[in-house]
Each structure stands twice: as C-alpha cells, then as structure tokens.
Image (cartoon, rainbow, N blue to C red):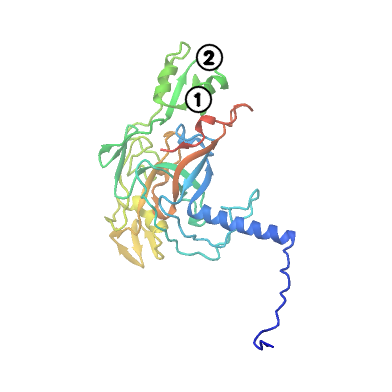
C-alpha cells in the first residue's frame, strides 16, 4: 500500500463574490472619466468656435479637435479640479477648482514648435481672476514667434521687414453705402454674417473680393474700406500709450517679440512694451515699477533677460478680433495646443434641414 504523507487536503475556495450592478457601473464610469481625462490632457481636446474673430477661416459653430501632441501637453498648475471641467461645473457658475494648491507647470516634449501661420488655442493672458491654465481659451492665428520683430503697415503684416502671406479668407470692415433697405437674407446669401445698420448704409465684415462684388450691384453706391490712418494712436491698442506710440490696429510696431534668453534694455521707451511681461508672466516675485523705472528685489534694473518665449496672435477677421494688437504677447506657458481638424459644424443661421455644414466636416485646418 502506497501512502503519500505529503499530500495536503484540497482547499476549497469560496466562489468570488459578484459585483453589484451599482458597483459595476461605478467602476465603469470611474474608468471612463480617468481615460477621458488623460486623453483630454495629453492628446486631443474638443473645442467650439463661439465668436467670429477667425471668420471666414473658422466659423461660429465649428467644432474642432485641438492637438496637445504638437507642442506637448502641460502638467496642470491647478490639480484640485473636477475632472472634465474648465472654470465652472457644467451648467452652473460654481467654480470647478480650488487654487489652494498651485504647482509649477512643465511642458512635455511635442513633435513640433509653434510656427507662424499655425491656428493656436491658448489661455487668455490678461485674465487674472483664474490661474493661468484655467483662463478662458482663445483661438487665433500665430503671426509672430519668439525673436521676430513684427510691424503692421496699412493693414499688411511684416515680420523682420518682410511682408507675411495673408490668410486666404482674411476679412476687414467695410461701409456699404446704399439707400435700399437690405434684409438679413441678402447678406446671408452672400455669406456675410457680421452686419450693422448705419446711417446711409451698413457696416459689414467681409473679404476684399466680396466687397468688390457688392460694389458692382446697381443699388450700391460704394463699398468703402474702414481702416485706421498712420500716425493716429489708439489708446485701446497695446501698449496703451498713444502719446509715445502712435499705433493702431492697422498701423502697429515695430515690436520685438521676446525670446527666452534674449536681453533687452529697460528704459522709458521699452518699459511700457515689456512691463506686463516682466511683472505678470515671468514669475518674478519681487518686481515692481515705480516712477517709470523697473525694480527687481528692490534694485533698479536697466536690462532684462526673458525666461520664456512669447508669441503674437491675430484673428483672420482683422477688424473684429480682440488679439495681441490690444493686449500684447502670449507666453509660452499659456499655449494649449494646435487646432488641427473640424469634426462638426453647425450653422446658427441655418434652417432645420440646413443646420449642419456638411462640407466642413473633417476639414483639416491650415
């Protein structure tokens, strides 16, 4: 008889307890939220176009995919935030974050740098009521990169003295002189959506080509381009010192765009141009301006070396865009991503059957 002393009595395992229905759904939702948050943070995020500042390149009602991969995703500055929100909890005015903890932001490697002509989403720099990574998202075209010198003469942008190619569907503001009353359909049929009734006619935002077409209509007396004249400073235009800089939206600069590591002299002429950068975006703890002079750590500064790159952004709808001409530079740490594709487009002025702009779906943005 063979006896196996080393054999143990089989252990009977208790059957695994099945998850409840609520637990299964809870785990699935948690996984989905984590996965969506990671995708949104590191790869692509969906945005919509709410204003006409980029028309007709991008239209109100376009839904975009914005790539975080191109320039590299940023680590969050404000980690205490409700997932998949921006400034407020959906459908409310309740803040979706706490700024009790603020971290230094780092950018992971991307596969490209911001280029001139890129359509870029960024956090609106002057908005100080929110942390930098939760400021309102703006979308504009990058006109100048760090190290460029930008100027605008008679509405034409120049980079380092060379004329820059204009966007194909760039618009400006025109006065349409006519005694006729033109209804909304007249303008919508011609793809003109920004219209203001004015004495003797209408003020519209449109392209040069379309303005010429309108001037050929028998009941139109003329279409006159509404542009600012050189030498007439606008106090609303950066740097908001018309007595020193007679710049306006159509005649601007020259202005050097700061580059990381570059040094500029600080004096009464340059300080208005770079004061906000140094005080607000460069993370200098003890910087201040007193009696027209810059002080850092209590010492007067006559030159300054920039800690990061900056960019100059403008809308393609040049006379209907709040952009860098009005509030200055966009810091590198405010860059969110590159707009790459329109995945859906709805026309707010379209009828029920024509609400979707089918021709724009899956258009690549350039």
Compare residues 151 and 92 and report the one nearer the observer. 92
Query: Residue 349: x, y in percent?
Result: 58, 28
Compare residues 99 and 45 and report the one nearer the observer. 45
Above or below: residue 151 compared with residue 349 = below
Q: Which residue is mark 2?
A: 180
- Image quarter in which the N terminus is found: bottom right
Tell me the CA gap for discs 2 and 1: 19 Å
Compare residues 261 and 126 and report the one nearer the observer. 261
Evaluate whether residue 339 shows in this view: yes
- Image quarter in which the C terminus is found: top left
Residue at 38% from the left image edge and 33% from the top image edge? 167
Query: Residue 365: x, y in percent?
Result: 44, 38
Secondary-structure class at tag 2: loop
Query: Residue 260: x, y in percent?
Result: 32, 56
Residue at 33% from the left image edge and 36% from the top image edge? 251
Q: Is residue 308 left or right of residue 132?
A: left
Q: Nearer the viewer, mark 2 or mark 1?
A: 1
Secondary-structure class at tag 1: loop
Evaluate whether residue 238 shows in this view: no
Residue 191: mark: 1
Residue at 36% from the left image edge and 40% from the top image edge? 117
Residue at 71% from the left image edge and 62% from the top image edge? 23
Compare residues 147 and 151 and report the one nearer the observer. 147
Q: Residue furthest left?
A: 161
Above or below: residue 190 compared with residue 343 = above
Label 2 close to label 1 by CB (< 8 Å): no
């Amino acid at each position: 008889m063979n006896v196996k002393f080393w054999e143990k009595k089989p252990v009977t395992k208790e059957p695994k307890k099945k998850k409840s229905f609520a637990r299964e759904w809870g785990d699935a939702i948690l996984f989905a939220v984590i996965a969506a948050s990671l995708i949104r943070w590191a790869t692509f995020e969906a945005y919509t176009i709410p204003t006409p500042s980029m028309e007709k390149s991008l239209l109100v009602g376009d839904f975009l995919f914005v790539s975080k991969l191109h320039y590299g995703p940023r680590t969050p500055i404000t980690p205490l935030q409700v997932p998949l929100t921006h400034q407020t909890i959906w459908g409310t005015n309740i803040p979706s974050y706490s700024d009790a903890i603020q971290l230094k932001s780092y950018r992971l490697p991307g596969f490209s740098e911001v280029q001139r002509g890129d359509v870029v989403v960024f956090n609106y720099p002057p908005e100080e009521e929110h942390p930098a990574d939760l400021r309102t998202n703006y979308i504009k075209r990058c006109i100048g990169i760090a190290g460029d010198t930008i100027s605008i003469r008679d509405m034409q942008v120049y980079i380092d003295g060379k004329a820059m190619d204009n966007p194909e569907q760039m618009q400006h503001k025109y006065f349409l002189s006519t005694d006729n009353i033109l209804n909304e359909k007249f303008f919508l049929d011609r793809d003109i959506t920004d219209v203001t009734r004015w004495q003797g006619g209408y003020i519209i935002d449109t392209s040069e080509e379309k303005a010429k077409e309108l001037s050929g209509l028998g009941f139109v007396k003329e279409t006159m381009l509404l542009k600012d004249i050189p030498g007439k400073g606008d106090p609303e235009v950066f740097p908001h010192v018309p007595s020193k800089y007679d710049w306006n939206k159509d005649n601007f600069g020259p202005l050097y765009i700061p580059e990381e590591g570059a040094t500029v002299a600080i004096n009464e002429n340059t300080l208005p141009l770079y004061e906000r950068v140094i005080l607000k975006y460069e993370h200098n703890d003890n910087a201040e301006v007193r009696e027209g002079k810059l002080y850092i750590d209590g010492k007067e500064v006559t030159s300054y070396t920039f800690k990061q790159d900056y960019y100059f952004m403008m809308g393609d709808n040049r006379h209907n865009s709040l952009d860098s001409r009005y509030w200055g530079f966009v810091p590198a740490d405010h860059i969110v991503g590159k707009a790459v594709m329109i995945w859906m487009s709805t026309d707010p002025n379209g009828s029920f059957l024509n609400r979707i702009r089918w021709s724009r779906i899956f258009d690549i943005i350039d």
